[in-house]
Structure formats: structure tokens, C-alpha cells
Image (cartoon, helix red, strand yellow):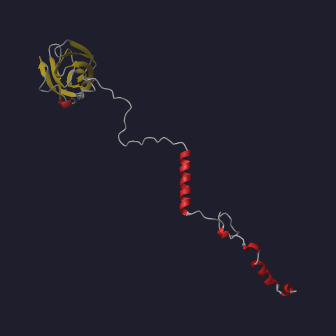
Amino acid sequence: MLWAAVPLSVALVFIQIVEPDGAAMPDASTAESGAVTTPGDPLPQWPRAQLAQAQSDQAQSEQTSQPQEQASPSPTVGNPVSSTTPSVRPTGSAEASAPGATPATPPVTTVSVEAEASSNLLGGDAKVASCATCDGGARVQYVNDENYLEVYVDLPVPGTRSVAVRYESDGLRKMGVQINGGPTLTYPVAGSGGWETPATFTFEAHLSAGRNALRFSGHSPDIDRIVVG
């Protein structure tokens, strides 16, 4: 037979050429749907413009599906506003008016006067005598009911002050004191231990601002110095 003499490869080619209807198998590259792929081919890629549009549509859809948050007002830069109304201070109040300077009280000063000072007044037979153990080297003696020593003390402010009298005596005495012409007060004064031994007797008296007159009398010891503190 003739067919037996035709090689097998030629017969296969002939069968493919004369296949009925001449229809060939569809090529993957010509498929209308574009969904058919052959193994090993890369997955289809969306065109860039369509991909961007799809992403935009999806973002817009998610935004509209979420509830809109109410934006809080932006803080205003500036001075803080107080929520309270400032109180109005009545006119004429002490704090509303300009505070005046409180006058400073002069400090208490100590005034010391020597009994033998020339500014003092000696009455009767009272006199100045030398004294080696006395302050200033002298004292006033013979002060008694008929004789007196009047000492003048200047003070900046009035008040009750301490008056210290430095004296010398050989025994107990009674010292009479008169302040600015007032009544005479008598104080017992112990002996100092002798006419050459000083001691101090202190009492309180209310004195005025300015000049004060302190008169010493009675059966008094010899007086050396008066200190008002």
C-alpha cells in the first residue's frame, strides 16, 4: 500500500493540514475576555490610570461611610480670659487710696547726764565735790530737804522710762524725786558701802517729749550721774 510507504512524520503533518473546517485552537493572546492565561504567563496588570481611579473611588467610599468628627475650634493665641468678673473696690476705701508712709517711731535713746554738769540747777547749799571714784571725777553732795539738785533731760518722745541714779553713801538714805513740778516721791536707798564706793538705784517715771526736769531732794546720798533709758 501507498500509505505504508509514507513516513510517519509526513503523515502527521498532512493530517494537521487537512483537518476538517481548518479551525485552529484559540491563542491565549487573542482571547476576547482576557481571562484565559497560560501557565507561566504573568498575571494581567491593571492600566495605571484605571488603578489610580479605583483607589480614589475606594478611599472616597470609606470616607463617606465613617461618621464625620466635629472639629474643635482652634485655640486663639493671646491673654487668657478670666471667667470671673473683677470686683469693684468702693471709692474711698483704705486700700483704694494711695497708702501713706507710716511714721517711724523714733528708737528709745539713752540719755546720760552728769550731776555736776553746768546745765543743771543746784538749790540751797548743794554743791559739787571732787570724787576719785565717780564718773567724771565729781559728784553733788549735801542734797536734803532744804537743798536740791535739778537735772534736765531732753527726750524725743513721751513715755514711761527707766531712771538710774549712780550714787555713793555710807548708810541708808531716803531720796525724794519730783518730775516736772509734780508731787515728790520718796524712795529708800541702801548704802553703797562707803563714800568712795559707787552704787546704782533705779526707778520708773513717766517723762514728756522735750525737756524734763528731775529734782532730787530729801535725805539723799551724794549723786554722781543720772541715766534715762
Farthest residue, direction bottom: 5
How many labels sit on residues?
A: 0
Please name the residue shown 53% across and 54% down the image: 56
From this view, report whether residue 146 is shown above or below residue 17: above
Q: Nearer the viewer, residue 16 or 35?
A: 16
Residue 138, horizontal then vertical, whole percent: 17, 28
Please name the residue shown 54% across and 52% down the image: 59
- Which quadrant of the view contains residue 134? top left
Q: Quadrant of the N terminus?
A: bottom right
Q: Quadrant of the C terminus?
A: top left
Residue 28 in view (yes/no): yes
Residue 198, horizontal then vertical, whole percent: 25, 26
Farthest residue, direction top: 183
Residue 52, horizontal then vertical, whole percent: 54, 59
Q: Nearer the viewer, residue 213 or 65?
A: 65
Please name the residue shown 72% across and 71% down the image: 25
Residue 109 in view (yes/no): no
From this view, report whether residue 148 is shown above or below residue 22: above
Q: Nearer the viewer, residue 52 or 70?
A: 52
- Which quadrant of the view contains residue 117? top left
From this view, report whether residue 19 is shown above or below residue 156: below
Residue 134 vs residue 29: left or right? left
- Which quadrant of the view contains residue 109? top left
Residue 15, horizontal then vertical, whole percent: 78, 79
